[in-house]
Amino acid sequence: MLVLFSSDHKRHNPKFEYYNGAKIPYAERPERIEKIVEACREMGLELKDLKGIRTNKFTDKIEVLHSKQYIEYLKQTSGQVKNKDHIIPSVFIKDTHTPLTESTYSVALESAELAVEAARRLKLNNSQSIYVLCRPPGHHAEEESMAGYCYFNNIALAANDLSIDGKVAILDIDFHHGNGTQKMFYRRDDVLYVSLHADPKAAFPYQSGFSDELGEAKGAGFNYNIPLPVDTTPKLYLKALNNAIDRINEYKPKYLLISLGFDTFVDDPIGGLGLTEKTYFKIGQILNEHLKYPTLIVQEGGYNIDKLGELAKNFVTGFENRYPS
Ligand code: Q9C
Ligand code: ZN
């Protein structure tokens, strides 16, 4: 497995977010990706730092899924932050968890470009799986709004590119429902969106992720949500995962993209289903065994800094069919 990241991600480093008005430390820390990079290095995976990959032409590319006004607003507003640590934008935003710093715009662009570059490489060599360590994450970002630590929808941009080549399935196993990804493909049948997540009645993003959201128009039947209670055990989680896998195999995609979040871990500070360290090994193993497609794994959430390395190692070990340590 090839692992792509950009060490530039560290420049996006807000200190605070707001939760119902209370100022709390920002959970989406640079250390998250550092820990996963370190774990990949220890595993001896092929690791490439694509720092500086950003090209000027790339803004045209994100206009396929994000509006010009939104992109321009992010650019202008991010540029105006300067001496202040961060600001919470007033518009084009769905919550108060998504601050802008001076470098947020360029780092978010680079994160999206990394995902698109990973998709390009997957197409070139479609036997090898790629793990792309995007930061900031992307699956909550919609056409015209930032949300839940996300600015541009990394996986959606990658999926859209690959869809030119054949059908794409997205499996989202972050703790949170990927409202942005769902919305972008809701009326399309060439990209299937399947998501396992905490029941939105009880968890962010609250407004979407229910099982009756099945797609619209041509996309009817190509959106599949599996909401789970927050106390879901590993056994029940794996059962739901098998259900998701069946739907994907029935679809027969050319490519598989996975939104991977480690915030389903039982001790995650902001998420947390009942999954243990070992469950990630099993998830990796099951995905490898039952979904035989060129696969792009895109990092989304996961906030237990001390555990992320171990969880990533377990997932990759299972996915690559290695011996667990
Ligand atoms: N009490 C991702 O995992 N809610 N985003 C924080 C803190 C925001 C999660 C609530 C959750 C956003 C990519
Ligand atoms: Zn999440």
Image (cartoon, rainbow, N blue to C red):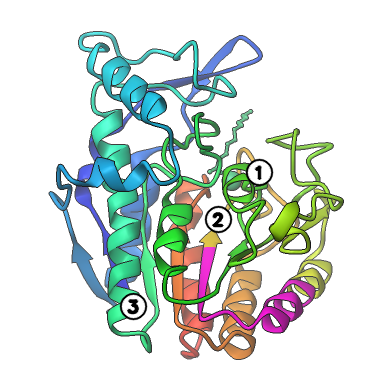
Instruction: Work out whether 251 lies above or below 191.
Output: below
Say which label, 3 or 1, has the lower sequence index: 3
Secondary structure beneath label 3:
helix
Amino acid tagged 2: Gly
Amino acid tagged 3: Lys
Taking the magenta stretch, the answer to whether it contains residue 118 is no
67 vs 14, nearest the viewer: 67
Instruction: Kindly identify the residue that appears in the image at 35 percent across and 66 percent down.
Output: 39
Discs 3/2, front: 3
Instruction: Kindly identify the residue that appears in the image at 18 percent across and 60 percent down.
Output: 49
Mark 1 C-beta to ligand 2 under 8 Å: yes
Find residue 299 and report its image quarter: bottom left
> Residue 227: horizontal and vertical position, in percent?
81, 53
Instruction: Kindly identify the residue that appears in the image at 27 percent across and 62 percent down.
Output: 117
Mark 2 C-beta to ligand 2 under 8 Å: yes
Looking at the rendered image, the quarter that the N terminus falls into is: bottom left
Say which label, 3 or 2, has the lower sequence index: 3
Q: Which residue is mark 2?
A: 261
Q: Is residue 235 left or right of residue 251?
A: right
Discs 3/1, front: 3
- Mark 2–mark 1 distance (CA, rounded to whole Å): 10 Å
Mark 3 C-beta to ligand 1 under 8 Å: no
> Residue 120: horizontal and vertical position, in percent?
29, 69
Amino acid tagged 1: Gly
Taking the magenta stretch, the answer to whether it contains residue 253 is yes
Q: Which residue is mark 3?
A: 123
Give the crowd class for mark 3: few <14, some 14-19, many >=20 residues within 10 Å. some
Discs 2/1, front: 2
Instruction: Work out whether 78 lies above or below 126.
Output: above
The segment highlighted magenta reads 242-258
